[in-house]
Amino acid sequence: MPSGKQTLLSLLTEYSQRYSETSDLDEISDRVKAGLLLHGSSSNSMWKAVEDITWKSHCAREDGLTVTEQGLTLEPSGILLTDLFSVISEDETLINHVRKTYPEISPDAFQSALHIIWLLLGSVEWSKAHEEIESKIDVDGAQQKKSLKAYQRKLKEYREDPEDYS
């Protein structure tokens, strides 16, 4: 039996890799909510938390006809969690609180952490901008290993000379 984490990651991987029809979004939302419960907990507060989240489309045009992204949103606003996090991460009060709590974190490291968290949130969204790449390329074990090795090599070059690593 898969763990709650495995179940949630499987669902998020599936839905972030393809466009979903509007008629399927309620079912997808319920499946993701169930995955969040399996992974997080089923405490009273968690039931409320998952009910505040849904999988929705985000439209670029006001007429609602051009869907550009689908992902986790906060209800009832429909704001994507990545957009919400972007606003939260600019709050000076929050930044100051984090600096007081963790004075050992440099401002640059803090900005790096915010960027990585935003990337992780964004990785579980479907995006029209990435659809062609993600829908036509299978994640092949050999190709993935080749890409990872290439970027591990680039990472080593960066560490050796951060000014000239390309």
Image (cartoon, rainbow, N blue to C red):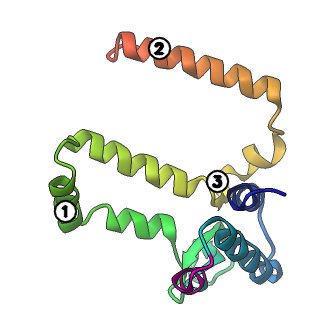
- Element under disc 2: helix
Q: Quadrant of residue 3?
A: bottom right
State the image coordinates of residue 116 (x, y, percent, origin top left).
44, 46
Which numbered disc covers residue 156? 2
Instruction: Mark 2 or mark 3: name the one nearer the start of the chain.
Output: 3
- Element under disc 1: helix
Question: In the displayed structure, would residue 47 be above or below residue 110?
Answer: below
For image coordinates 69% across by 78% down, the residue present is: 65
Question: In the displayed structure, would residue 110 be above or below residue 73?
Answer: above
Answer left or right for 19 relative to 155.
Answer: right
Label 3 sits on what residue type? Ala
Answer left or right for 72 relative to 113.
Answer: right
- Element under disc 3: helix
Which stretch did the figure color magenta? Answer: 42-50
Magenta region includes residue 44: yes
Instruction: Mark 3 or mark 1: name the one nearer the start of the chain.
Output: 1
Answer left or right for 15 relative to 45.
Answer: right
* Residue bearing mark 3: 129
